[in-house]
Image: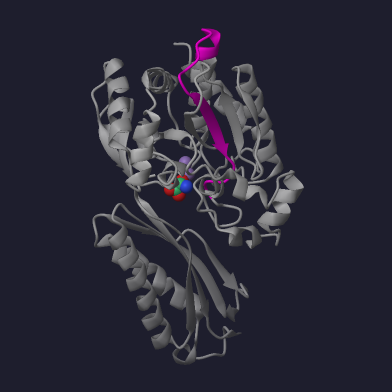
């Protein structure tokens, strides 16, 4: 056991870079993002890598190849967190990769490709709403309009990038499509109960659910809570609540669909005033893009019916969407071989959670390795947990994969690009 304990200790250090101790919250371009990035850069450099921040605040570390030119394999995950997060979401995927490189470096071993580890600055999208900012820039799907999204204090991403020392216009230079990246493999906690229930430390991901995020604004009429008769109210919050229940009902009747309303704001927000405005978010997920898109359409129509009946207005805006991503069969097979090498039965499973890996297909084949979560698989919560022993196993699997991965010949890569898979 020479990875697990150290990795868990490092996760504790990263957890200390938080905006609201003792809770863990680390948003994109915050001072805590800078602290976490500096800590990861130091770990990467100690492991024999070159490392630094890129224009959008991602930390990119590079372990040079054995001299052979060209191919690059990327790995890593995100450094940012949700509010009141657990310690391992995102962070595990970065630390396990650094542990592998440290081991290679200690043995003086180089790989037949350059290995890049990325600590993405903004996967969760908590601060500005748009998610996977860094990975989308690398995949050529960054939406420059995101730069004008503002946080709760009215600070735009553009301004926050400048304050952070980034370059708001530098996203164009991060595009890795058509380059020499031949694979992206991300390790991540499962954030669910499957591996725990089946007593398995790791699993290989088959695909990642697609996501649609809506912002819904309901506008009614404020009034005196004591004098306006119930029958003549245009209560924005009551209408919004009926819409929230419509999300729950619609998604509850379809097995491969989940829907969540995670944020709601109410104005004017006084105890004795009928709410005039209510704004909420909807997060829809499905492994089937058609089901997800149809659900978004059906819900927007349902919101309009509810609004009409209640005499309020409603505006539903889609501000983020990412298609479901299939993991690459060849990479899955290679990961499965590395799992078998550890004497562990193979368990393939889908990911209901979104990950940076889902936006990488335009760059290269992608795959994911899951590690078991404890506490019934809870995540996005302080009770999120994993064990040093499982960290040890997952890191050994990733190291075996990295040491045995043979980059495709350039002509094979061209064929993939011609097939339009890249
Ligand atoms: O929302 C997600 O699925 C991920 O944690 N960003
Ligand atoms: Mn997350
Ligand atoms: Mn994550």
410 horizontally vs 104: left or right: left
Quadrant into which the C terminus falls: top left
Which residue sits at x=53%, y=30%?
A: 117
Residue 275 in view here? no
Q: Position of residue 161 (x, y in %)?
A: 70, 49
* Magenta stretch bounds: 103-124
Q: In this picture, is 5 found above or below 203?
A: above
The answer to which of 242 and 30 lies nearer the viewer is: 30
Residue 400 in view here? yes
Coloration of the structure image:
one colour
Which residue ends up furthest to the front in the rendered image? 411
Quadrant into which the N terminus falls: top left
Tell me where residue 58 sits by quadrant.
top right
Q: In this picture, is 30 found above or below 10?
A: below
The answer to which of 164 and 62 lies nearer the viewer is: 62
Which residue sits at x=44%, y=78%?
A: 239
The answer to which of 368 and 376 lies nearer the viewer is: 368
Q: Position of residue 80 (x, y in %)?
A: 57, 42
Q: Position of residue 373 (x, y in %)?
A: 39, 32
Tell me where residue 195 sits by quadrant.
top left
Q: Position of residue 88 (x, y in %)?
A: 49, 33
Which residue sits at x=60%, y=17%?
A: 48
Which residue sits at x=33%, y=31%?
A: 331
Q: How many callouts does the rendering have?
A: 0
Magenta stretch encompasses residue 110: yes
Magenta stretch encompasses residue 57: no
Tell me where residue 228 sits by quadrant.
bottom right
């Amino acid at each position: 056991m020479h990875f697990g304990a150290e990795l868990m200790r490092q996760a504790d250090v990263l957890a200390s870079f938080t905006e609201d101790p003792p809770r863990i919250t680390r948003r994109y371009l915050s001072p805590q993002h800078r602290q976490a990035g500096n800590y990861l850069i130091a770990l990467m450099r100690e492991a024999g890598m070159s490392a630094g921040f890129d224009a959008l605040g991602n930390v990119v570390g590079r372990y040079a190849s054995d001299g052979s030119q060209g191919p690059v394999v990327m790995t890593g995950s995100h450094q940012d967190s949700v509010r009141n997060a657990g310690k391992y979401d995102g962070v595990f995927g970065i630390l396990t990769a650094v542990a592998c490189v440290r081991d290679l470096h200690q043995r003086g071993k180089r790989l037949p490709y350059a290995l890049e580890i990325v600590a993405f600055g903004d996967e969760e999208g908590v601060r500005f709403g748009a998610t996977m900012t860094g990975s989308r820039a690398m995949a050529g799907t960054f939406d420059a309009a995101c730069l004008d999204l503002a946080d709760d204090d009215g600070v735009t991403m553009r301004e926050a990038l400048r304050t952070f020392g980034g370059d708001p216009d530098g996203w164009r230079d991060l595009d890795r499509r058509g380059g020499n990246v031949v694979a992206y493999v991300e390790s991540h906690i499962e954030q669910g109960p499957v591996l725990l229930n089946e007593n398995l430390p790791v699993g290989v991901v088959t695909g990642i659910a697609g996501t649609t995020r809506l912002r819904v604004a309901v506008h009614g009429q404020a009034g005196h809570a004591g004098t306006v008769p119930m029958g003549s109210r245009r209560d924005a919050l009551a209408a919004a609540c009926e819409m929230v229940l419509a999300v729950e009902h619609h998604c509850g009747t379809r097995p491969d669909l989940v829907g969540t309303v995670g944020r709601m704001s109410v104005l004017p927000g006084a105890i004795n005033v009928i709410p005039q405005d209510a704004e909420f978010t909807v997060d829809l997920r499905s492994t089937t893009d058609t089901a997800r898109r149809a659900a978004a359409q059906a819900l927007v129509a349902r919101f309009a019916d509810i609004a009409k009946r209640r005499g309020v207005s409603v505006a539903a805006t889609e501000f983020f969407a990412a298609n479901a991503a299939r993991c690459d069969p060849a990479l899955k097979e290679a990961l499965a071989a590395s799992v078998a090498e550890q004497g562990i039965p193979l368990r393939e499973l889908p990911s209901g959670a979104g990950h940076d890996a889902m936006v990488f297909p335009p760059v290269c084949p992608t795959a994911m390795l899951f590690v078991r979560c404890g506490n019934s698989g809870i995540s996005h919560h302080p009770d999120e947990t994993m064990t040093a022993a499982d960290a040890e196993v997952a890191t050994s699997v990733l190291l075996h994969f990295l040491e045995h991965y043979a980059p495709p010949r350039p002509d094979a890569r061209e064929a993939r690009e011609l097939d339009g898979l890249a």
